[in-house]
Image: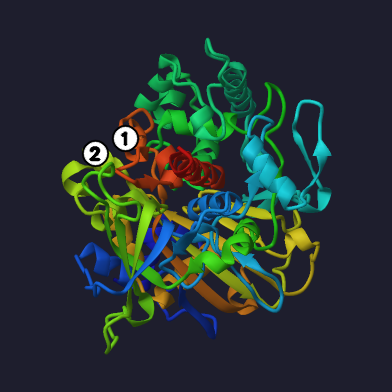
Amino acid sequence: MNRRELLASFLGMPFVLSSGCSLSTPKLPAEGGFVGTSHHAGHKLRDGYRPALSDDAWKITDVVIVGGGVAGLSAARKLKQAGVDFVLLELEPEVGGTAISGKSPVVAYPWAAHYLPVPLPHNTELINLLDEMDLLEGRSADGTPIVAEQFLCRDPQERLFIDGKWQEGPFPWAQASDDDITQLKSFQTAIDRWVAWRDSDGKRAFSIPVADCSTDDEIMALDKLSMLQWMNDQGWTSRHLKWYVDYACRDDYGLNSDQTSAWAGIFYFAARISKPGVASQSFITWPEGNGRLVAHLRKYVADHILTGHAVSQIVPPENTATGDENSTKIIAFQTANSSPLANSPPEVHGWKARHVIVAAPPFLTAHLIADYHEFGPSSIKDFEFGSWLVANLHLDDRPSNDSFVMNWDNVIYDSPSLGYVTATHQRGIDRGPTILTYYFPLCDASPKAARERLFRLSWEDWADVVLTDLERAHPEIRRLTKRLDIMRWGHAMIRPTPGFISGPARTECSKPFRNVHFAHSALSGIPLFEEAFYHGNRAASEILESLNA
C-alpha cells in the first residue's frame, strides 16, 4: 500500500485528495514513538500463561483489587476509609487506566479522558469526592455543587474548522440553512422532553450514574434502535444535524450514529442537563485531564499499590460457606520480565484473601477466574470494546490563526478523528509552546479488525495519518511539531451498540461470583469516569457489608 492509499483508508479519499497528498516520503518529527499499554503481558494471559507458585510463598490480606483504573482506585479509597487491609495489583507501571496523563517541561497533558461534567445534585458520592479535592466553593439550595472557577473549563471552549476557517461552537453554523437550524431546534426539543421525563417512581429517563436511570419499557425500547434510525424516525434529514450527532457518538463511545444505541445517543445529550431549556453542565478540567482525579485517588492508597503486576489466576473456593476466611488464591507475575524478549522467567507472587475485586474489563474475567468459563454468565461474550489512537503533539509554537482563536476543544468537520484538545488552554497560556492531544476512534471496522489495523501500522505511518489530518486546518503543523508520541488503546472503551444496554450482560456480570466482585465502567455500558467511580464504590460496599455481617 502506498502513502496515498494508506491515508485514504483512514482519512477518506476526498479528504486526502483535497489535502494534495503526494506519494513522497513525508516530513515527520525528529522525536516520538509508541508509548503505553503492556499488551504483551495481557496477551500472555489470554494465551493461557499460568506461572506456578510454591506453597510457602503466600501473603495474607482481606481484599485483593485487580486493576488500578478509576474503578479499582475508587474501591481502594472506600476500603481504606473503612480500615480494611488490601492490596491493589496493576499491570501497568502507573495506575489510572484510561485516565492516565503525561508530563513535559511545558505542561501536563492527558492520554485519554480529559474532563468531568459538574455532577447533578443526586450524585452525592461524587460530589463528596470533589469536595474532598477542595474543588468546591459550596453548594446551591438544591444541592448543586458550586465549582471554583479555576477548575471550570475556560472560555472559549469549542471551535469547528469548516469551509477553510474556524468558527465558534461544534455545530456547523457556517453551512447551516434555515432548515438545518429548524431541525436542530426540533432535536433540542426532543432532548428536553427526555430531560423532563419521569417514571412512576420519579426516576429520570437518563441519569448519571446509569444505575439511577429509569428502566421503564418506553425508555428501554430506545435501546432496540440505532441513534441514526431514531433520528430518521423523527423525520430529521439535515446532513449537518446528523454530522453533529454522529460526532457526539464518536466522541463518547467511539461509534458512528448508525452503530450507537439510541438509548446511549440520547443519554449523551440528556443525562448532563438538570432541567429542560438549560445548557449541559459545565466541564471540570485540568491540563492533565482526568489524571488529576487519578492523582487524588492514588495518594490515599499509594502504600497499598503494586504496579507492574499482572494477575494470572484467581481461584475462589467452590463453597464460600465452608472455606476458611482467607480462601481465595490470587497469583500474579511481575511484568518487567514478561516481554517476548525477556531472557529470565518473571517473579511470581501470591495472596490469599477473603474477597477479590476484579476492576478490569470483563473480557479478562474468564481468563483470570477459575471455573468462570463453566459457571459464570454466558452473557459476558456480549461485551465489545472499541480501539482508539491518541497522539500527543509537542509544538514549538502555536499554528497561525486568521479566524477564531485556538480553543480547549478543536474539531475538524468531516474528519474521522475528533480533533484535539489544548493542554495549555486551562492554564491561560495562549502563546508559545503547547501540547495538542489528538483523538482518533477506529469505528469503521469490527472491533477485532480495528485492533489489528491499530497495531499493524508503524509509528511513521500513524504519525503521517495524524499530521495529514491536522494539516488541512494547520498547514504548518509538521514544521511546528518537534515530538509526536502515540498511545494505542486496543480495548479503549465499551461499545453501547443497539441491544446491549437492555440486554442481560451488564446485570449478570455485575453480580459477585462466589467471593469475587466486579467493578468497571463497562458494567454500565457507558464509558465514563462517573460509572467507573460508581462501580468501584459499589463493589467495595458489597465487601464491607459481608465483612461486617
Q: Which mark is residue 73?
A: none
> 526 above or below 449?
above
Q: Is residue 238 visible?
A: no
Is 468 above or below relative to 106? Answer: above
The color scheme shown is rainbow
Task: Tell me the quarter of the picture where residue 475 sits.
Answer: bottom right
Q: Quadrant of the C terminus?
A: top left
Q: In this rendering, is residue 431 above or below 407?
A: below
Question: Most extreme residue toward the left, as rendered?
Answer: 374
- 224 lies left or right of 546: left
Q: Secondary structure at mark 1?
A: helix
Query: Where in the figure is residue 85, as x and y percent of width and height?
Result: 50, 58
Location of residue 350 with respect to 449 vertically, above or below: below
Q: CA distance from mark 1 to mark 2?
A: 6 Å
Q: Quadrant of residue 453?
A: bottom left
- Residue at which label 1 appears: 508
Kind of residue sitting beneath label 1: Glu
Q: Position of residue 94 (x, y in %)?
A: 51, 69
Task: Give the residue at x 23% y 44%.
Answer: 319
User: Are the residues flagged by discs 1 and 2 in contact, CB closer than 8 Å?
Assistant: yes
- The answer to whether residue 15 of the structure is visible from this angle is yes
Read off the residue under disc 2: 377
Front in this rendered view, residue 276 or 5? 276
Q: In the figure, is residue 190 to the left or right of 157?
A: left
Residue at 21% x, 39% y: name it: 378
Q: Is residue 528 left or right of residue 428?
A: left
Q: Nearer the viewer, residue 101 or 518?
A: 518
Q: Where the N terminus falls, by quadrant? A: bottom left
Mark toward the start of the polypeptide (1 vs 2) = 2
Q: Amino acid at mark 2?
A: Pro
Residue visible at 62% across and 79% down?
479
Single out the residue that lies furthest toward the bottom. 343
